[in-house]
Image: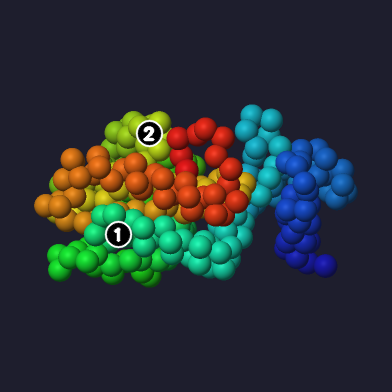
Amino acid sequence: MPLGTTAVDRSAELLLRVLESAHPVALTDLAEATGIPKSTASRLVSALERRGLIEQDGERGRLRPGPAILRVAERGMLERNVVEVARPSLEALSDASGETINLAVPASLGVEHVAQVDSRHFLGTGQWIGRTVDYHPTAVGKVFMAFGRAPVPGRPMRKHAECTITDPRVLRAELEVVRRQGWATAIDELEPGLAAMAAPVRGAGGDVVAALSISGPTVRMTPPRIAELHSILIDEARTLSRRLGHRDQGEHAA
């Protein structure tokens, strides 16, 4: 068997062991279970980690399915489940705000919008379905970064508008606020005159799987209006999370 094929087979076996394990598994246990030398297993695991197929579970170093695997699983679940059950929350937020309402999910190249209720005003925010947008200048993107569903860049980011946060240190400070208060805003950051607010939606396992957002022009989405709407947004995000099987244990996020 060619050397390259052997490496692929061994990597696949290690990945399957991690996916089929009920708990995070140690590298030593993986090597023993598969008969692969620990040094070889370590190299293969490193390659799988770089691709996001597996990841280390905290400081213990045990291995669990990575973000790439979880994205694939959750995308399938979202298509069959979240979009279907999100409609009442989307409609409730539309009735309460009159603005554009979106359901978004994290994707490899940015935020992807999967459901929308249009604004009832002539001046709205356009059609977002099918559009992928950078994480850092959007409220939904900040939610995903704050709750570990998207990476926080370590270098200056693309400037979409005058108010776009491009400094990683400033962004990390804002994400800490998002984690603490449980919702995010982006005002004049993706483009001038556009304001948005978003809250996380959690699945049965507790991870953030989506985000609900309200967006509109800054002439209507003023700071006082955002302050009025944020509790409604958080309530609907929590309601949708409960429909997905999540049981709130007192965290700020839905």
Residue at image position (35%, 66%) is 116
| x, y percent for residue 64 | 68, 45
Mark 1 is surrounded, within 10 Å at the Cα level, by few (under 14), some (14 to 19) or many (20 or more) other residues, namely few
- To which residue does mark 2 refer? 181
Query: Which amino acid, mark 2?
Result: Gln
| Residue 141 visible (yes or no) | no
Q: Quadrant of residue 63?
A: top right
Marks 2 and 1 sit apart, C-alpha to C-alpha, by: 24 Å
Q: In the drawing, does residue 134 fall left or right of residue 73?
A: left
Name the foreground residue: 149 vs 29.
149
Name the foreground residue: 187 vs 2.
187
| Residue 91 visible (yes or no) | yes
What colour-coding does the image apply?
rainbow
Label 2 secondary element: helix
Query: Which amino acid, mark 1?
Result: Asp
| x, y percent for residue 134 | 34, 55
| x, y percent for residue 19 | 73, 53
Q: Residue furthest left?
A: 219
- To which residue does mark 1 refer? 95
